[in-house]
Structures are given as structure tokens and as C-alpha cells.
Amino acid sequence: MSNHEAVLKGMADKFARVNKRLQDLFLRLRSGPRDPEVVESIIAEQRELTKIFDDLVKLDASALADLQKLRGQVKKMIEKLNAILVQPFQTATLLRGDTLQVPKQNDDGSVVMENVPVFWVVGNRGEMVQLTIDPDVYEKKKARLVPGQIVRFSAQHAHIFDIVSDELRDELMRTGQEVSIDEILNANEVRIAVRMDEKEVVRIPAWFTDEMRKRIRVGEKWVRPVVGPAFLGYGPLPKSDVAEVLLEEVPDISFDQIGGLKDQIGKIRDAVELPYLYREEFLDHGLPAPKGVLLYGPPGCGKTLIAKAIANNLAARLSEKLKQIVTGYFINIKGPELLNKYVGETERKIREIFAMAREKASQDAPVVIFFDEMDALFRQRGSGISSDMESTIVPQLLAEIDGVEALRNVIVVGASNRQDLIDPAVLRPGRLDVKIEVSRPDAAGAFDILSIYLKAGVPLHKKYWDDKPHAHRMPNRLMDLMPEQWRAVDEKLRVVRETRGIKRRFVGQGVVKIDAVAADRRIKEMLLFDPEKAERARKALQAQPDTWSHEEWQIDSVGDAWNMLIYKAVEAMFLHTGAMASDAKKKKQEAENVIHSFFTREGSYIEADNQFLEITYEKGDKEILYHSDFLSGAALESMHRRAKKYAVKRYIETAHRERGIMMADLWNATRDEFREAEDLPNTANPDDWARIVCRKGQRIVYVKPLKGEVKQSAYEGPAEVVNTGQYL
């Protein structure tokens, strides 16, 4: 064996012995607390390894290939020891800076007191510790040493060694406990709600930008970080809990965009706007502003639109009076989703909702809290209809409305189509002071609603308006088919003609030529889907006279053309077919199953039959109800969309030759909307029908369907039912 080989073997044996001792030390280090004696032994072995490595470097590696391998093993073990022996650092959050006087000995032996910078920090468990700081860190990063900053320190030496990077700080601030902002105390502190009844005060980090501070709002969810529990962390969090059932928005709905509810809008303006616009006058008379408004009536009639318009219109009027921009807020609460199976959670959410409203109202902005489907939340206590949870939910709402904290600039608006189920304590004066019925639209109201959707800008067929004033002649078939019923509807629309300046006159009889090819094509299409209707259409085509009564409309603008189409559509909607006929004639029509129908010039087939059901009252009186008795704003909106769809399909089928809505589109849209209502879910209780059709007085005991499929009623009595539809 050569001399080099002998030296190398000796070093390898020495390394093996050191490595064995280190493995035993590692085992002791992992099995318990960090023992100083073990650490000292590891340091001693590290010195021995360093000496071995130095000796290996001095050897000539050219003769021995295994030398490099042994060098690598020793070097790897040294690096492992360096990692183990690194002093462990902890993180904490700076609370404030301070100075500490410590003795310092001069060169001449004298002792003076010197001010040394120190910092109070908050640990991860909330403990406060005073630490010294590395002089280089203090000099170079002094500007970043602000409250809320995260630092690294040595617990053994009570010394700050560095500040974490901004990227790491932002990441650490995202991990922690979710809390909600309960109150903003000042520019540097907020009160947070930790649990249901626990509240604490934490600080806002000084490194927060102005934009981040603006995002701190009452009710928002934030992270209380683990690394600095005395400070706010990341936020606001994505909406959840209460926020997920709120739709907080600045509404863009005005009262001008709501049709057919002129009387209701007038009442709301008197009750809500006047106390805000003329606050001093009301205070002079000792008259407080109303705290709430209840909007009740059938669904789809504009209750939600009115609630949105209250906030927007009030903000606009205040801006006009104060000569500055005032923003309105609309907090839309989805009632059923506010309910929670855990006791006290729904009440907590209600408290947070009103706290959020007060916070926004403190900016002198009108805030509307809108409870849709109010009967789902605030049912009559003790009614036995639900699980009696309303016994605590209702008092919580009453406490918020009547509480010590005044609801300044906050209006509570509730909407319900079952106002009879709401607890009377909610509806008494002093809470929901104003109660407004939002009823179904009449003929004039239906005209107003359709006028909002069908106006200049919506494509209109050139036969009605071609950018030139003209007198448009058209047959009035409904007047010839049902003269008595037509006159009744025409009288209802008198106010529309007067207020809209509609110019119409009757010009006698005129010949109407029908597109026979198109009419025959329509009948063939009906044969595929509805043979009975196709047979009715065939008979109507054969029996249709050539001459009809005509009327002439003066069209001076596109608005006049739309008024004409809307007028004729509403006329067809509110026509009470068979209502004015004599008993003998009516029996004959029923026996022959007469349906008033006709073909238009373009070959479209129109059926005029609006009877829906017959109700019998307790005393034996009977009444026919028509589709117009179940009309709503939502149904009218659906009708105008259907008419647009028919116009688009025709535009495509005619290779872009026939553009725009025609009269037949509105008639067919009305017919299809009414027909669809006959096939939707029903109610089996005649008492419910009384509420649906807004009939008061005698009790309904019998319901006979005149359209749709007759179904066996589950009600204990002779009542029969018919499908009601989405707007009933």
C-alpha cells in the first residue's frame, strides 16, 4: 500500500467515526427540546470535519480517484451541520418604536448613558416584547420601521435582525382568522367582531395606502393575521355570509321608467321625498319622516322597481336642491337566503345589515333597505305556519327600527304578495308607516308600460312609419266581430287618446285583401301541431268577409306609429269576449264553441278569446275572469320580447326584406303569453284565488276553468282549478 493510500484510508476511518457520533447527536436533537449540550457537541464535531476537509484538500488528487468522492462526502456533511446550527428566527409585528438608555464606557474609562433604539413588537400569540435592532438595519431601513411592519428577530438574543420583504409580508397577512368590521373608531383603529358577541379593537397598519384604507367599511370581512393579531391583514374578503344575500348598488332606475303606477308613485313621493327635501318644514311642525314603506300586491307588478327608484330619485332630488352630487344606495335583501339554521345567526345578519346602512347613511346619502318577500322572514308570531323562528327574528327587526340609534337617511321598504302573513307589529304606524297597494295594470296602465319598451329606436315595420307623415288606414275587425265589447274597451282607453294626443277617425267600410298563399301556408303549419286550430282557421278563412270597418290614424312621427300599434294590442288584451252577449246568443256560441278569429292582410291568423275561468261566490253569484284580470308588468315585458323575437325570425326568413315589428307580432305575442299561463302550476284553494285576482268580499267556493287542462282539485269542496301562470 502506497503512502497516499494509507493516509486516505486513515482519513476515511476518521470520517466514519465522526459521522457515527453525529448520527447519535442528530437522534438526540430530534427526540426532545434543543439541548445546548448537544449543540455544543455538534459544533465540536463540525470543527473536526473542517480539519479533515482541509487535510484532504492538501493531498494530491492525481494519484487517487477516491479522494474526490471523500471530499464531497465531508463537504456535504459540513453543509448539513451549518444548516442545523443556524440560529432560528421568529416573526413579529412592530407596534411602536422607543429608546432605551444603556451605559457605555469611553476610551478614558468614564461611563456615559447612551440612547439605543428599541421596538415593541407583538408576537404571534399576542404577547408584547421589547427588542433591540441591528444597527445596519436601523440605518438603512428606518423608513420602513412603522407600526404593522413584520420583522425577523432572535428570541434568544431579543434582537431584530431584518425586515421581511413586501411580497412575503403581503403573503403572511393573508393567513389568519376571518373577522368583520364592526365600527371604524378613528384613522388608526377599528373595532372588529370576532365571534357572535366578542368584539376587539385592532390597529390599521401604517403602511396601508389610502386606497386600502378606503376599502375598510363596516360589515366587510377581513383577515386578522396569525403573524400580527393586533393588526388588520388582508381584505376585504370575497362576499360571503351576510354579503352574499345583499345586493348593494347605486340604482339607475327612475320613476319615469315605471309605467302604469302613477297614483302609487305620487303617494311614495309625498311620503318619502317631501320629508327629506323639506326637512326643516317638517321639523317645524313636529312631523318625523316615515321609517318604512310596505308595497303589497300581486307579483310582477313593479314593487321592486319602485323600491329601487325611491333611492335613485331621492338622491337626484337632493343633488338638485343641495347643488352637489348625492349618491343613493339600494340594499336589496333576498329574504329567504337570510335564514340560517343556527340559532341567532339570522338575527346577527339583520344587525349587520342595519349597521352597514347606518354607515352609508352617515355620508348624508339616502339608503333604502329593501326586504323582498317580506312574509318569508317576518311572519306573524305564534301562527304555527313555520318553526317559530320568527319569535326572535321579528323582535330583532323591531329593535333595529325603534332602536336608540336613529335611522337617519335610512328607509325600510318591504314587498310582499302575502301581506296577511306579516306580523302586525311590523306593520303598525311608526314602523312601516306607509302602505301602498301595487295593483295589476288597467288598460291605460298597460299602454304606459308597453310605451316604455316600444318606442323610437326599436325597429318598426316600414308600412307603419317610413320617415314621412301620413294617414294610416287599417280595418277594425274587433269592432265588427264584437261591437259591444269593443266599445267598452275603447271607453277605457279614452284617457290614453286624450293624454297622448292620438288622432283617430272612422272612415266607413273598406275592402281587405288577404294574402291567400300565406294564409294557406299558415293553416298547413297548424296541421302539424294543432289540427283543431287548423280546422278553426280554415273555417274562419272561408267565412271571413271581404269588407271591414276601417279607421284612419294620423301618423306624424314614429311615436305616433308606436302609439297606434300599442293601442291596438292593448285593445285586444282587454276585450271581454262574450261578456256583453245576450243569454241566448251566449248559449249558442258556447254550443258551437265560437271563437272570434280572422286573418290579417299578411296571412297571419288571429284568435280573440280572452276568457280564462269562472268563479262562484258563497252566495251563488258567478263571475267570468279574463286573462287581462291576471295581467302584470312582468307579463307585458315578456310580451314585448316575444313580439321582437317574431320580428327577428321574419327578418331572417325573408332574407332581410321585412324588418321591424308588425301589428300581428304584438297580437300573437299576447296570445302566446296568455296561452302559456294556462299550462303552468296551479293552486287548489279558492281562498288563494281570491288573493290572486284581488277580489275581496264574498268567499270564493268554486272555480271552473274555461281554458287549459282541467285537473282534479285536492281542496275539500267542489272547487276546480286551472293553471295560473308566472304572473298570477
Image: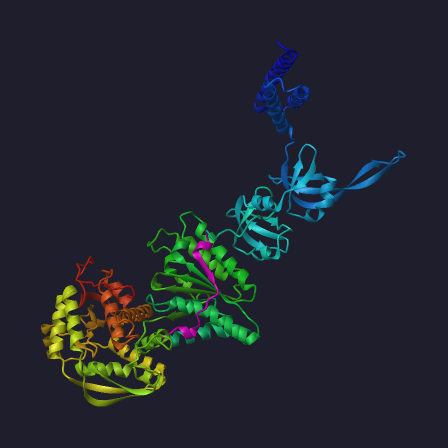
Residue 245 among magenta residues? yes
Q: Position of residue 374 (x, y in %)?
A: 39, 61
In this rendered view, identify the residue nearer to me: 392 or 613.
613
Q: Position of residue 434 (x, y in %)?
A: 43, 70
Q: Position of residue 337 (x, y in %)?
A: 40, 54
Hey, which residue is sitting farthest right in the picture?
A: 108
In this rendered view, identify the residue nearer to me: 354 or 27.
27
Give the total of numbered labels: 0
Apparent side of residue 620 relative to residue 132 in the rendered image (left or right): left
Query: Picture quarter containing residue 635?
Result: bottom left
Q: Position of residue 8 (x, y in %)?
A: 63, 15
| The N terminus sits in image quarter | top right
Residue 717 among magenta residues? no
Query: Picture quarter containing residue 332?
Result: bottom left
Asked if residue 114 can be seen in this view, the reply is yes
In this rendered view, identify the residue nearer to me: 235 or 315.
235
Query: Picture quarter containing residue 416?
Result: bottom left
- Say which residue appears at 62% left-offset and 29% top-offset: 83
Apparent side of residue 601 relative to residue 497 in the rendered image (left or right): left
The correct choice, above or below, for 501 with respect to 224 in the image is below
Hey, which residue is sitting farthest bottom in the picture?
A: 507
Here the colouring is rainbow
The correct choice, above or below, for 688 with respect to 446 in the image is above
The correct choice, above or below, for 576 with respect to 50 in the image is below
- Say which residue appears at 61% left-offset and 57% top-offset: 210
| The C terminus sits in image quarter | bottom left
The correct choice, above or below, for 702 with respect to 578 in the image is above
Asked if residue 275 can be seen in this view, the reply is no
Apparent side of residue 619 relative to residue 41 in the rendered image (left or right): left
The range drawn in magenta is 241-260
